[in-house]
Amino acid sequence: MSTSGADRVDAALRRSRRAGLRNTAARRAILDELARAVGDQGHLTATRLHHALLARGLTVELSTVRRALAQLVGLGIAHTVPIGRTTTFGLADDAHHHAVCAGCGDIRQLPAEAVAASVAAARAAGIEADPSGHPTGVVVYGRCTRCRTTTR
């Protein structure tokens, strides 16, 4: 998707408003951070997101962040990707899947077309995969180059 972070946030806020949620400063800041994370790892834990909001000077409780994330996931605005026992959150406005390093937790986005054959094979076997990115899409676990070379 080639839209700016601000456009992505505005679109997400419009969707949340249509669903009956208020556009609060906390919700906007959460969406801003998720949009900004795309250039980094693409996903944030609730705790990491909470720390980023505090660093921006926004006084918000971790429970508020968790509640807002749950609402955004429920609306399909955000999605989750499990990494071990941790859940990460990312924007779900762009159809994609994920590759996760089981060693360091690095997340890479995979275009929906890249895993189309696997989704088709699952469907043929009677398993309907989550639609791209909702709530997690397809997650491929493995080890990144750095983790493979440091464990040898």
Image (cartoon, helix red, strand yellow):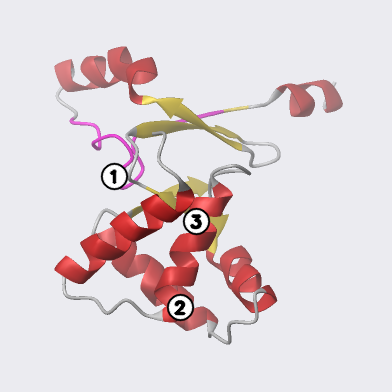
Crowd tier of the residue under label 2, counting other residues whose Cα lies within 10 Å: few below 14, some 14–19, many 20 or above: some
Q: Nearer the viewer, residue 104 or 8?
A: 8
What is the quadrant of residue 18 in the picture?
A: bottom left
Work out whether 95 lies above or below 70.
Answer: above
The residue lying at 57 percent from left, 50 percent from top is: 37
- Which residue is label 1 attached to? 134
Work out whether 149 lies above or below 5.
Answer: above
Which residues are drawn in magenta? 128-141
What is the quadrant of residue 69 in the picture?
A: bottom left
Badge 2 vs badge 1, beta-carbon distance below 8 Å: no
Q: Is residue 87 magenta?
A: no
Q: Quadrant of the N terminus?
A: top left
Q: Of marks 2 and 3, which one's residue comes earlier in the chain?
A: 2
Tell me the element at label 1. loop
Q: Nearer the viewer, residue 111 or 45?
A: 111
Q: How far is disc 2 from disc 3 in space, using C-alphas? A: 12 Å
Q: Amino acid at mark 3?
A: Leu
Q: Is residue 36 left or right of residue 1?
A: right
Q: Amino acid at mark 1?
A: His
Image position, residue 133 (x, y; %): 33, 40
Q: Is residue 72 left or right of residue 101?
A: left
- Which residue is label 3 attached to? 34
What is the quadrant of residue 86 in the picture?
A: bottom right
The residue lying at 32 percent from left, 76 percent from top is: 23
Crowd tier of the residue under label 3, counting other residues whose Cα lies within 10 Å: few below 14, some 14–19, many 20 or above: many
Q: How far is disc 2 from disc 1 in space, using C-alphas? A: 23 Å
Q: Which mark is residue 26?
A: 2
The residue lying at 65 percent from left, 81 percent from top is: 57
